Image (cartoon, helix red, strand yellow):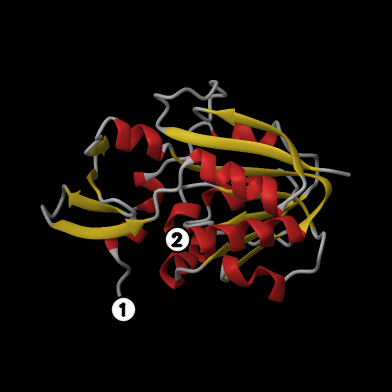
Amino acid sequence: MPLNPFSKYYHQIFPMGNQIDFISKRIEKQATILDAGCAGGQLSIQLAQQNHQVYGIDLSEEMIKVAQANSPSLSNLEIKKMDILKLQEYFQRRFFDAVICIGNVLALLQNEKAVKKAIQNFDYAMKPQSTVILQILNYEFLYRNKIETLPRFENEEIIFERKNELLPHRVQFHKKLTIKKSGSVIEEVTPAYPIKLNTLMKIIKQETNWESVQLFGSFKGDSFAETSLPLILVAHKKG
């Protein structure tokens, strides 16, 4: 069966940009890392090439196939289909030096109960003094300003566009992918739970012993502001 075009072109739609530099500066050398929601595996692969032991997991079988196809043969890289909400079934307690969950993955869990379970699982799997890096969209900014579109992406092969349907407790991302060579247009709708910063912070305070929480508005390291589109959170587990 051919891949869904959104999976096939994922690495183009969502290029790495400054992510690897941002993350590399905040984790130990030769760390054991969980890339939770690894998608096409770009981040997992680059971290493994920096001599980290990396476990890239994703619930999408299609994305796992893409990640595995893209992965070089590295003994320190494992890519597997796995549910973030069942993490405790797969990994020992205090196994990871760093947990990374970017790409708005937490919002794709669909409700606050599931986000809480994911945060609990991350905390369970983190060693003392380990690092966690989370990234979602700044939903308060989207809702307050009624932002109905996200930035358009275009290169020589594709055009990728997104419109936001902002419902009371759910966002519907209407995605449109145009393949220039064939002229074909593929449309897809992805639902998400618009988790707000205060809700995320409440869960972290109640369910973990993370400290030194820092907020950023981009992977360039810009400080988080009300007008930031990304919301990036970095914290450390108490020793």
The numbered mark, 2 or 1, whose residue comes first in the sequence reads 1
Q: Which mark is residue 111?
A: 2
* Residue at (65, 30) in percent of width and height: 214
Q: Which mark is residue 98?
A: none
Q: Is residue 90 visible?
A: no
| Residue 148 spot, x, y in % from top left | 21, 38
| Residue 9 spot, x, y in % from top left | 33, 53
Q: Quadrant of the C terminus?
A: top right
The 10 Å Cα crowd at callout 2, few under 14, some 14 to 19, many 20 or more, is some
Task: Determine whether, in the image, residue 27 is placed left or right of residue 73.
Answer: right
State the count of labels: 2
* Residue at (23, 38) in percent of width and height: 149
Task: Say if 41 sits above or below 212 in the image.
Answer: below
Q: Quadrant of residue 110?
A: bottom left
| Residue 138 spot, x, y in % from top left | 42, 36
Label 2 residue SS: loop
Task: Say if 225 sits above or below 166 in the image.
Answer: above
Q: CA distance from mark 2 to mark 1?
A: 31 Å
**Can you tell which of label 2 and label 1 is closer to the viewer?**
2
Label 1 residue SS: loop
The residue singled out by tag 1 in the image is: 1
Three-letter code for the amino acid on which mark 2 is drawn: Asn
Q: Is residue 182 visible?
A: yes
| Residue 10 spot, x, y in % from top left | 38, 52
Three-letter code for the amino acid on which mark 1 is drawn: Met
- Tell me whether the residue at label 2 lies in contact with that at label 1, contact meaning CB atoms closer than 8 angstroms: no
Q: Quadrant of the N terminus?
A: bottom left
The 10 Å Cα crowd at callout 1, few under 14, some 14 to 19, many 20 or more, is few
